[in-house]
Image (spheres, helix red, strand yellow):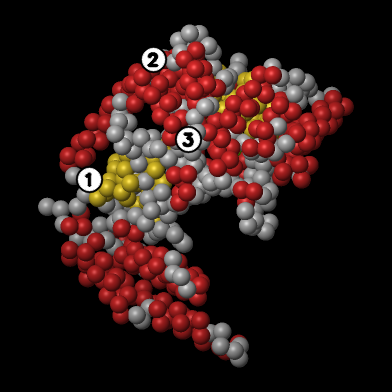
């Protein structure tokens, strides 16, 4: 029978990457990574308790040694800090709690110690008193020292199992470098659906939930769990009934995916024959297999800041050329669009050692960095131009706020073209050049920008955050991040109109393009291209095939008259549910997150 602490519990967060995953929790809180965790038998409780005692005694001896050494070389009281550290380890209530944790959780001593300390540390980090908050760093230091002093128990050598990661937050680089063979899914306390971590989770096909406020410390490591990446439910100690429900749901989703695969070779036209280019967003060339598998019509966004995962600097021209060639060849006969470096904000920094900015989302981001570092920019532009002979390649610039930046970018491109010509190196002189429209000011001067580029690509993730002043990664305000806000819709419309006037095309490469509830609205607003994660291509294709262009246009006209995001959302949702009900089969009731409406 389940003990009370093994009773089913359901935590609700925001789903950011679809799918169902079943597996034991691997809990890793803030500050430092969790030690290995394993289950122990009743007869091992005392063994674990004494392993803990030994680690504590060892740490105290080390701290005393450190204090003596420092005091022998200094006349001040610097050594007292180690005495203070040692006092933490004498606290009888701490020792008692760890023993109790070993007994009740039946988990190894180092993990029980870690879990108890995490609760304690979290309380300190959230304390109102700044002195206490600062001291949490000292306590972390002591914790790590104790953890290093545990002797490995040879009976339990590294259970290198598949797991579900439960953690406070993940950086995009953590997400991209996690071992996919062991990671079944992840849940985090922080984060939001538009963070780069969420975008990467979708790219990697890992079910994920974010924004599980305050839940992490309540989840016991190794507890059996289920991630429902459709509704954002995270279930700990699921009952048999719940497990069965999710096994069935998982089977149904698999069948539904297979049905969508049958549409793979159909052109993405609406029922009345209006073509929308359905391309893919990728960040790594290995994703080209998925682009092919789902038959996307090109790559609408290749994010290049992920180069910075491997090194602090962008690779040199030759190394970039190799990647861009692979991209161009792999996307043939379709167009691949490379976005020049978009560092800063919540993304990787091109200069990680520079002073942190107070408002990184309003700071040194995107094209601003490229224009301030002409050598870095030119290296990238030259590599793109050189790869353009291999197929159909385009480039676009992120974080454009107005016309002058586009002009400066074009000037740089011209300079690189001149240099290459002089060097006798081939490139495509007609390479398509586009501007990302992701800042409201750019949308409002889209008319002027459109005259000087070949296409506009709406980066709605940023466009929304800058229009409604909601940080896209802050889950506290995620309910205010509304993609159907009338202001956002009107800015999209202004952009499309400007492009049409200049006889160029407009795409959407933000996550809005992925959201099948919004497809009728985007199509009706006159978007020519939707670029979505490769795994999302089948459902968006199905949506496009089911819609009527004329009706979408009517819908968009009506939407532009509405005053609230809720009304616009309901309008587009109604058409989506009527035209492709199958795609909503498992999203009834509370089954769909409204975070992004
Ligand atoms: C966007 O802002 O919508 C976009 C596509 O760019 P990113 O998400 O990389 O900022
Ligand atoms: Mg952006």
Q: Which residue is mark 3?
A: 564
Residue depicted at x 34% and y 80%: 91
Q: Which residue is mark 1?
A: 238
Distance between mark 1 and mark 2 Cα atoms: 34 Å
**Front position among marks 3 and 2:** 3
Q: Quadrant of ligand 2?
A: top right
State the residue in front, 55 or 458: 458
Residue depicted at x 41% and y 29%: 570
Q: Which residue is mark 2?
A: 262
Q: Residue extending furthest left?
A: 1
Distance between mark 3 and mark 1 Cα atoms: 39 Å
Image spot of residue 348 (x, y percent): 60, 47
First reached walking from the N terminus: tag 3 or tag 1: 1
State the residue in front, 506 or 485: 485
**SS for tag 2?**
loop
**Crowd band around label 2 with a 10 angstrom C-alpha radius: few (<14), some (14–19), many (20+):** few
């Amino acid at each position: 029978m389940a003990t009370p602490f093994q009773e089913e519990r359901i935590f609700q967060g925001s789903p950011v990457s679809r799918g169902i995953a079943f597996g034991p929790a691997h809990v890793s809180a803030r500050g430092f990574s969790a030690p290995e965790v394993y289950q122990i038998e009743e007869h091992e409780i005392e063994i674990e308790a004494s392993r803990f005692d030994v680690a504590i005694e060892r740490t105290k001896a080390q701290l005393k040694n450190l204090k003596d050494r420092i005091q022998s070389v200094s006349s001040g009281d610097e050594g007292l800090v180690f005495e203070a550290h040692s006092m933490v380890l004498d606290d009888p209530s701490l020792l008692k709690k760890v023993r109790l944790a070993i007994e009740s959780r039946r988990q190894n001593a180092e993990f029980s110690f870690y879990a108890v300390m995490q609760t304690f540390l979290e309380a300190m980090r959230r304390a109102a008193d700044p002195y206490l908050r600062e001291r949490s760093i000292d306590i972390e230091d002591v914790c790590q020292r104790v953890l290093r002093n545990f002797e490995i128990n040879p009976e339990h050598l590294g259970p290198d199992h598949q797991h579900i990661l439960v953690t406070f937050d993940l950086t995009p680089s953590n997400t991209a470098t996690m071992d996919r063979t062991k990671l079944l899914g992840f849940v985090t306390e922080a984060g939001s659906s538009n963070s780069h971590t969420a975008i990467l989770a979708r790219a990697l096909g890992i079910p994920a939930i974010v924004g599980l406020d305050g839940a992490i410390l309540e989840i016991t490591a190794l507890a059996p769990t289920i991630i429902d990446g459709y509704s954002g439910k995270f279930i700990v100690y699921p009952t048999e009934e719940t497990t069965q429900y999710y096994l069935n749901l998982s089977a149904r989703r698999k069948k539904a995916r297979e049905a969508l695969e049958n549409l793979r070779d159909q052109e993405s036209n609406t029922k009345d024959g209006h073509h929308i280019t359905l391309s893919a967003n990728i960040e790594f060339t290995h994703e080209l297999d998925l682009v092919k598998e789902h038959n996307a019509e090109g790559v609408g966004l290749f994010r290049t800041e992920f180069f910075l995962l491997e090194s602090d600097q962008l690779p040199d021209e030759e190394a970039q050329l190799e990647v861009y060639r692979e991209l161009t060849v792999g996307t043939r006969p379709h167009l691949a669009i490379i976005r020049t470096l978009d560092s800063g904000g919540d993304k990787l920094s091109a200069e990680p050692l520079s002073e942190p900015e107070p408002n990184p989302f309003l700071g040194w981001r995107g094209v601003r960095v490229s224009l301030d570092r002409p050598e870095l920019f030119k290296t990238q532009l030259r590599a793109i131009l050189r790869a353009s002979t291999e197929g159909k390649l385009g480039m676009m610039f992120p974080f454009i706020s107005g016309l002058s930046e586009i002009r400066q970018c074009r000037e740089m491109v011209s300079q690189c073209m001149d240099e290459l010509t002089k060097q006798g190196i081939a490139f495509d002189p007609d390479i398509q050049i586009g501007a990302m429209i992701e800042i409201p000011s750019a949308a409002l001067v889209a008319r002027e920008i459109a005259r000087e580029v070949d296409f506009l690509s709406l980066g709605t993730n940023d466009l929304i955050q800058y229009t409604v002043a909601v940080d896209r990664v802050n889950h506290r305000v995620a309910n205010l991040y509304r993609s159907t806000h009338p202001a956002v819709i009107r800015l999209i419309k202004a952009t499309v109109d400007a492009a049409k006037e200049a006889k160029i095309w407009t795409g959407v490469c933000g996550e809005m393009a992925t959201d099948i509830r919004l497809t009728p609205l985007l199509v009706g607003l006159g978007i020519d291209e939707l670029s979505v994660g490769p795994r999302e291509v089948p459902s968006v294709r199905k949506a496009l095939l089911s819609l009527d262009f004329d009706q979408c246009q009517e819908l968009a006209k009506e939407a532009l008259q509405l005053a609230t995001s809720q009304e616009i959302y309901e309008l587009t949702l109604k058409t989506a549910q009527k035209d492709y009900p199958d795609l909503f089969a498992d999203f009834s009731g509370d089954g769909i997150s409204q975070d992004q409406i």
